[in-house]
Image (tube, helix red, strand yellow):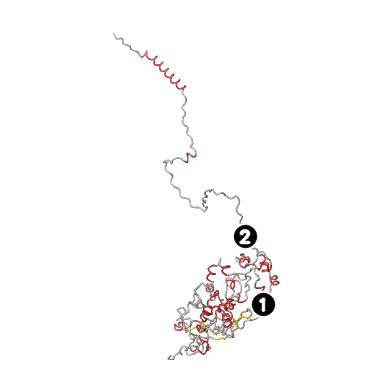
């Protein structure tokens, strides 16, 4: 005759309790023995990355009014450096000698000097006759 | 006009000039000379009268360029008429004569705006100040004195001066503009009366309302077509005869007969669309067939090619003149007209175009 094994609920509780304790124990041990997984930390992009960043799909703000031009002169283009060596000393430039006419003015603004130096022009010996 | 003393000619009496734009240029810039030198040593290379083009042209280029062709500068009117009386083979001698006797009348910028003309001995007019409007008595009438000035100012004995001067004190430039003086009005003009009258009596702001039918009895259509204004409104003026030029020891001189006061109406030798009148006053000019005999024989072989009684615009304008006293002054009378009897026998041929054969018919006559 077959022997049927039956378990009553009263007999299962101790076993379930043991299993549960063992399971918790295993899990706890496993947790204590593992390396902690590093979480990703947000970092600010470098300047280079930021400049090179792809444009986002974010809609651009509406354009503002273009400012009126001012009288400030625009910067001129800086000439590209060349390989021409820069002379260390500029070549000598001839400086024009300033004209000094103080001697002219001194005489020609002095009535006394002019009278002393003047020589009357000789009248021509032949004179015209009649109305010119 | 007595010449200035030698020192006076070069005296900068007005030192404000030195602060003016011309004064700031410095003496040597225009006149040359030796920088830094004193006394007479500074005069080496000095040019008393700077060249108009070099000294003035950089700033006043338009005026200076035009002025090179003005009659004041190139004396083209004289050259033209002498060439007409002469012949190509004689022109070298004629030009030599002109160089000795005529070019002192040739003007430069400085001879009007800074100094007296060389013809008058030169000399600063206002302490070297540059006069935009030259002083009339030292420049304009300094050269145009014996005829124009005396007429205009009433210095011919017994003849009133010009109303424009006597009554209104109008200086020369009231009528004669800078453009006219500088030759910019008509650069192609070859002589004083070339082209339309300038100035004209009927210019704007002058007598522009004067016209036939303006209410003045004698201002009729016929009179306006027949006569220039001066036929009725100018009076006795000076006529010159027989000028001869020569040199003695390098000194150029002239001799001329005493002038003759007269008023003559001739046929218009320049009749044109611009000057349509039949009659104009005519003045005898001092040329003579032997005027330039010192420079060669028979230098004026075509003497008769040009009248010796020339188109004239006397500067002694009057409202009333002997011609306006009555109709019979001109109609039926030869008194004021140039007839053959008024012309020297040797000049009859030259004046055929201006001699009046018959005066206007007497009023009421059948002629």
Q: What is the secondary structure assignment of the residue under circle 1?
A: loop
Residue A131 percent location from the top left of the image: 60, 82
Chain letter behind tag 1 = A
Residue B147 percent location from the top left of the image: 57, 81
Q: What is the secondary structure assignment of the residue under circle 2?
A: loop
Residue B333 percent location from the top left of the image: 49, 90
Q: Nearer the viewer, residue B215 or B30?
A: B30
Q: Which residue is mark 2?
A: A96
State whether discs 2 and 1 lie on one chain: yes
Q: Is residue A16 visible?
A: yes
Chain letter behind tag 2 = A
Compared to B336, does B53 lie above or below?
above
Residue B278 percent location from the top left of the image: 46, 83
Q: Residue furthest left?
A: A1
Q: Nearer the viewer, residue B51 or B214?
A: B51
Q: Nearer the viewer, residue B138 or A78?
A: A78
Q: Nearer the viewer, residue B292 or B367?
A: B292
- The residue sitting at 49% across, 38% down in the picture is A46
Residue B177 image label: none
Packing grade of label 2 (10 A; few <14, some 14-19, many >=20) is: few
Q: Earlier in the sequence, mark 2 or mark 1?
A: 2
Q: CA distance from mark 2 to mark 1?
A: 40 Å
Image quarter of residue B98: bottom right
Compared to A20, does B55 lie above or below?
below
Q: Is residue B207 visible?
A: no
Residue A122 image label: 1
Which quadrant, please, contains the C terminus of chain B? Answer: bottom left
- The residue sitting at 60% across, 69% down in the picture is B50
Which quadrant, please, contains the N terminus of chain B? Answer: bottom right
Compared to B318, does B10 lie above or below?
above
Packing grade of label 1 (10 A; few <14, some 14-19, many >=20) is: few
């Amino acid at each position: 005759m077959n022997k049927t094994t039956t378990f009553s609920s009263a007999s299962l509780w101790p076993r379930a309790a043991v299993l549960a304790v063992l399971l918790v124990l295993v899990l706890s041990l496993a947790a204590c023995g593992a390396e902690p997984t590093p979480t990703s930390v947000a970092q600010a992009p470098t300047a280079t990355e930021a400049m090179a960043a792809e444009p986002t799909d974010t809609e651009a703000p509406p354009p503002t009014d273009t400012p009126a031009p001012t009288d400030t002169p625009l910067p001129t283009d800086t000439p590209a450096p060349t390989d021409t060596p820069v002379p260390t000393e500029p070549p000598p430039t001839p400086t024009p000698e300033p004209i000094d006419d103080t001697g002219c003015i001194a005489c020609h603004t002095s009535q006394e000097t002019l009278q002393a130096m003047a020589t009357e022009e000789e009248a021509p010996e032949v004179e015209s006759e009649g109305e010119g | 006009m007595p010449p200035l003393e030698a020192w006076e000619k070069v005296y900068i009496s007005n030192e404000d000039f030195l602060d003016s734009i011309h004064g700031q240029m410095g003496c040597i810039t225009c006149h040359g000379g030796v920088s830094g030198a004193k006394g007479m040593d500074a005069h080496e290379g000095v040019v008393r009268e700077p060249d108009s083009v070099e000294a003035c042209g950089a700033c006043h280029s338009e005026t200076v360029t035009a002025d090179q062709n003005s009659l004041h500068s190139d004396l083209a009117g004289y050259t033209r008429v002498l060439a007409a009386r002469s012949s190509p083979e004689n022109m070298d001698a004629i030009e030599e004569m002109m160089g000795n006797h005529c070019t002192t009348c040739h003007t430069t910028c400085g001879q009007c705006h800074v100094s007296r003309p060389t013809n008058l001995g030169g000399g600063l007019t206002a302490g070297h100040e540059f006069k935009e409007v030259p002083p009339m008595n030292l420049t304009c009438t300094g050269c145009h004195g014996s005829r124009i000035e005396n007429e205009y100012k009433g210095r011919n004995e017994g003849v009133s001066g010009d109303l424009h001067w006597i009554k209104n004190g109008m200086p020369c430039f009231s009528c004669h503009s800078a453009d006219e003086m500088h030759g910019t009005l008509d650069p192609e003009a070859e002589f004083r009366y070339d082209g339309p009258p300038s100035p004209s009596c009927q210019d704007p702001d002058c007598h522009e309302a004067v016209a036939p039918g303006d209410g003045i009895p004698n201002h009729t259509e016929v009179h306006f077509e027949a006569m220039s204004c001066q036929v009725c409104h100018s009076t006795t003026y000076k006529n010159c005869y027989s000028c001869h030029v020569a040199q003695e020891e390098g000194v150029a001189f002239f001799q001329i007969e005493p002038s003759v006061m007269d008023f003559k109406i001739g046929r218009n030798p320049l009749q044109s669309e611009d000057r349509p009148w039949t009659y104009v006053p005519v003045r005898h000019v001092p040329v003579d067939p032997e005027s330039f005999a010192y420079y060669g024989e028979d230098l004026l072989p075509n003497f008769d090619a040009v009248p010796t009684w020339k188109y004239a615009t006397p500067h002694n304008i009057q409202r009333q003149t002997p011609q306006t006293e009555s109709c019979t002054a001109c109609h039926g009378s030869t008194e004021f007209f140039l007839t053959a009897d008024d012309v020297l026998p040797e000049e009859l041929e030259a004046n055929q175009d201006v001699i009046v054969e018959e005066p206007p018919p007497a009023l009421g006559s059948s002629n």
